[in-house]
Image (cartoon, coloured by chain):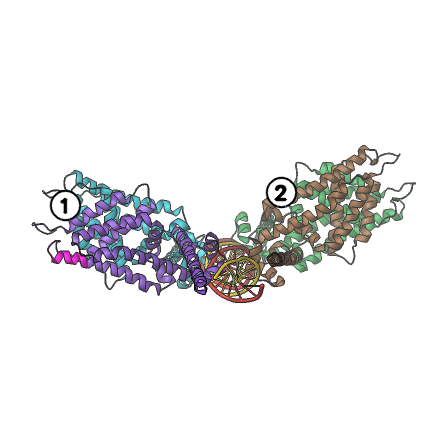
Chain colours: A cyan, B purple, C green, D brown, E red, F yellow
Amino acid sequence: MTTDSLSRKERERLRHKEEIVAGALKLFSEKGFHNVSMLEIATVTEFATGTLYNFFPSKEALYSELMLNCSRKILALLLPILDSSETEDRKLRRFIEAHRTIFTEHMDMIRLYLGDVNRLSMVIAPQLEEEIEQIRVTILDRLSAVIQSGVEHGRFRACNAGMVALALSAMLESLAFSAVTYPQSISMEQGLPEIEAMLFDGLRQWEGTSHAQ
Amino acid sequence: MTTDSLSRKERERLRHKEEIVAGALKLFSEKGFHNVSMLEIATVTEFATGTLYNFFPSKEALYSELMLNCSRKILALLLPILDSSETEDRKLRRFIEAHRTIFTEHMDMIRLYLGDVNRLSMVIAPQLEEEIEQIRVTILDRLSAVIQSGVEHGRFRACNAGMVALALSAMLESLAFSAVTYPQSISMEQGLPEIEAMLFDGLRQWEGTSHAQ
Amino acid sequence: MTTDSLSRKERERLRHKEEIVAGALKLFSEKGFHNVSMLEIATVTEFATGTLYNFFPSKEALYSELMLNCSRKILALLLPILDSSETEDRKLRRFIEAHRTIFTEHMDMIRLYLGDVNRLSMVIAPQLEEEIEQIRVTILDRLSAVIQSGVEHGRFRACNAGMVALALSAMLESLAFSAVTYPQSISMEQGLPEIEAMLFDGLRQWEGTSHAQ
Amino acid sequence: MTTDSLSRKERERLRHKEEIVAGALKLFSEKGFHNVSMLEIATVTEFATGTLYNFFPSKEALYSELMLNCSRKILALLLPILDSSETEDRKLRRFIEAHRTIFTEHMDMIRLYLGDVNRLSMVIAPQLEEEIEQIRVTILDRLSAVIQSGVEHGRFRACNAGMVALALSAMLESLAFSAVTYPQSISMEQGLPEIEAMLFDGLRQWEGTSHAQ
DNA sequence: CATGAATGAGACTTCATTCAT
DNA sequence: CATGAATGAAGTCTCATTCAT
């Protein structure tokens, strides 16, 4: 009973924290860090401003936790795919396909991640960069390794795997961002097959010469 | 003489405005819109804050003009290439090559353009979106048209030209951004050929099947 | 049994209150009224903040009670000495000596009393001033009376007893404060005899001239 | 003319700063650091809150400058007296007398100095402590040196000069504070002669025994 | 009585903007 | 046009206090 009571309080507290995180994510992803005030977050989450500070020591801490959450979730989704024991071909197709899921289920997260990750975090919370960057680098490294492996097994043409990974990542991020920003003219449905095609045609090993000019 | 005097005054005024724009560009590109104060801009340009308001009605207007300047310069550089009367193949190679120039000569501009263009302008100055977006769309449309033309002339395989354009644009922007952010590990020199290769291999028309899964 | 139960409860309640008072005294004396939060007091006393409000209606009330406690204890220590039936000389020596005890046993009290007594109480709890001030005045009056009595009995030279009392009090308080603040360079051991000497030399009746310039 | 114009602006700015300092001194001396808000200071000085920050980077900086000003003024008043080439006797009498001037001309300063000097500065601006403490120590040292010199020249009885200096300082400060706090019952006029008497009687060298117990 | 999450008034501070000179 | 002191709205954050459990 005591356990239940404590548990209920703890559960409630956790729920409140999640409500704050959810409200903040929505606002930050829509308007960016500097254009959202703590009062605004408090209002949409139906708490008092002071309450926010019972969960997060500062606005920047709240933002940081949000960014970390997003990055971690994406990492948890993509890493297993790249680390699985399938052919490189299959891994890449699933990697690309996974972006469809991320997009459809975590639109705010994407918007936050793609919107502020590059510039803002550096200025606002330099130390935040560490883990965020770590995660980005991890994904790119794995992606690069998979491509390199394909090359070494003679399945892909010779290429700079790191650059191809960066290019693939860029295409996917850009597609996701465009689809969020202009949903009526750009869609993941159209874009993903095209990216897939471009990647695999670009990497395909064929008998002729390499990409001569 | 009055004409001369006015002319000199006008020239001086123009010079002052350009100094302000230059200082603001540097600061905004380094720190982002919200992390630069008008006092800061005034200090580096050696004017008083009030003087800035003789040239720009607001901080946002100054920022908007900056963004427009950048976008226009890029447009002026890229559009002639895409509109020239060369083969599609040659146009694309020159289009890609042009990014090298943009990067090496206008680093601040790139940083500003790629950093804030997506999110911030919407919030800060919604009406700014209009022309900026117009320019982006124009470039993408032209790029798309060139690709589509190549397809219709049988030089490229069938593809969704708009998506390929978006993908190419994304790769180039991402490469530029990475090269600015991590200059010691990512360089345009390495990246551009790889992008070129990927694009042309992806578009190459060959006798065999299309990119079947 | 009910009586016993209530009594136990009451004793417990009293004990809790004393714990709170003790913790608050320590914190207030170290950091001053405004630099101690109720949460801090709650933490060191291992209660919840709400619990503090079951014993004291406000932070100021807690502070006031503390001040009164200190003042009353000091009064209870000093008054019997001044009211005893000894010679004025002996009374004053014991009065001075008593400050050694106060110092060694109630350092926190001293720090609180000397630190905030003058300014803060006026602002925080004007009505607190009443009894605190009453206590100060009581001590000074009795001290003054003792000196005046000594003068009237021809044991001390003619003087303004009130001023001498004030001076003695000032010297003792200042010594105590200095001994608390710079314990390595100022000690009660050194200071008390010096004060005693100065007082009695100053008051000594001798045949020669008075303190003419 | 340009000189005049600049000079006028500078003079005006200086005047404004002095107005702020004066208003802040009055408020701080009456209510203490924590019980005065920047808005309050802005209101009494008839400026906007932001204006205060054009003169002082923070509330604490404003307070610190105030404290330093007071301390320095008092130092500038007292030090020349103690450093003059008169007899120790004469120096001490003038030192005591100087407090009458300090009192009559700088009542707020006294209240600020005596009220907050002990506790607050430590908490608020530890580095402020340095110069303030330096000043206190300087005065006490010089005072102590004068007394010691008197002892060595056989003009005063043997005594612990440091303790006597502390005692004299305590009496003077306490008198000043009391005269400020209870002006109707305590006055410098009454008190200063009494302190002088006590000091010189306490220090007087006479043929008889020393202060035997 | 004990708890501690929630509250919200109020404090400090910033900075885009104005305007008298 | 240039200046920069003054402005004050708005933002972040603190903390004494309340109240449902």
Residue beneath disc 1 = A204
Tag 1 and tag 2, C-beta contact below 8 Å = no
Report whether residue D159 is seen: no
Q: Is residue C205 magenta?
A: no
Residue B76 at what x, y percent from top left?
28, 57
Tag 1 and tag 2 share a subunit:
no
Q: Which chain is mark 1 on?
A: A
Q: Left or right: where does residue B100 sit relative to residue D210?
A: left
The magenta segment is B145-161
Which residue is more in the foreground, B78 or C26? B78
Q: Relative to C53, is A55 on the left or the right? A: left
Return the residue at label 2.
D130
Which type of secondary structure does the marked residue at label 1 adopt?
loop
Q: Give the spatial CA distance, label 1 vs label 2.
A: 74 Å
**Residue nearer the viewer, D16 or C197:** D16
Residue D137 x %, y %: 69, 41
Q: Residue at x 62, y 44 (%)?
A: D129
Q: Which chain carries label 2?
A: D
State how many labels appear: 2
The correct choice, above or below, for B135 with respect to D90 in the image is below
- Disc 1 marks a residue whose amino acid type is Arg
Q: Residues within 10 Å of mark 2 (few under 14, many from 20)?
A: few
Residue type indicated by callout 2? Glu
Q: Residue at x 8, y 51 (%)?
A: B209
Q: Which of B35 and B54 is in front in this view?
A: B54
